[in-house]
Each structure stands twice: as C-alpha cells, then as structure tokens.
Image (cartoon, rainbow, N blue to C red):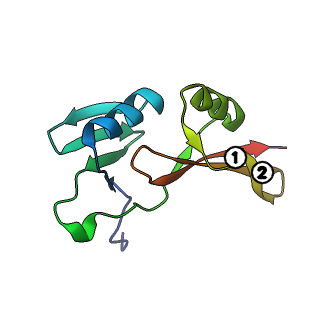
Amino acid sequence: MDTAMIKFVGQIGIPVKDINRALDFYKNKLGLSLLFNTDSMAFFECNGLRLMLTLPEKEEFAHSSSVIYFQVNNIKDTYERLVDKEVTFIDKPHVVTKMEQTETWMVFFKDTEDNTHALMSEVQV
C-alpha cells in the first residue's frame, strides 16, 4: 500500500520583475525549453519539472525565489559556456562535499531578476 502523500515536485514558481527579460535569460542563456508564455507568466520544461516565471500578483510575493540547483553533466564546461553568454556568477565551480568516490561540485549565479541559483554536478573520482 502506497502511503506517501507527495510523489514529486511538479512545478517551481520563480518571481520576476520583467517577464520578457527573464524569459530571454531562461530560454536563450540557460537553454531551457519554453512550453508557453503569457503577458505575465512563462513555463519551461526541465526534465519533468516545470519552472514557472511569474510577475507577482501581490507585493507579498515580490521577493527572491528559493535557490534552484540545476543538475549538469560537466559543471566546468557548462560554467564556461554560460560565462560566454554573460551569465553573472557569484563564485567559480568548487567541491562542496565528497562522499566515497563521488564529489559534489557547485557554482552559484544570478538570473536577470536577482534570484540566486546554482549549477551542480556529481563527479566520480
């Protein structure tokens, strides 16, 4: 008998100040697949997880989002490609933990709406 109420996260909302600027960043710089957009929202596919960019409906929702950790295969290559696209990084790729034969690498960046997100990669050593 399955007792888990929550199966998985289906969508994450990211508050934005300028929908067109944010849409360009997530589509053209990060390379996410745009599902559809309206005047106040944009929806992207991210391997089974939907990202929703949205203009806040109320002032109480007009704040930075939670940090989203985007899994990548090669963090150093992805970092260099995004630097070439003028993505603003807070730091450089670095090891945050090592568990047995696996290192977890991360690097943090800002989107055009001042939200902080990260790239992460699991590297076998």
Where is residue 3 drawn, in percent x and y?
Answer: 36, 74
The number of callouts visible is 2
Comparing 97 with 86, the one in front is 86
**Kind of residue at badge 1:** Glu
Figure check: 56 above or below 48:
below
Helix, strand or loop at label 2? It is strand
Horizontal arrangement in the rendering, residue 47 relative to residue 55 (left or right) = right
Residue designated by label 2: 103
**Mark closer to the chain start, 1 or 2:** 2
**Kind of residue at badge 2:** Glu
Helix, strand or loop at label 1? It is strand
Classify the position of the C terminus by image quarter: top right
Instruction: Name the residue: 33% across, 46% down.
Output: 50
Residue designated by label 1: 122
- Do the numbered discs 1 and 2 sit on residues whose CB atoms are within 8 Å? yes
Comparing 119 with 124, the one in front is 119
Where is residue 9 drawn, in percent x and y?
Answer: 37, 58
Which disc, if any, is residue 64?
none
* The image quarter in which residue 85 lies: top right
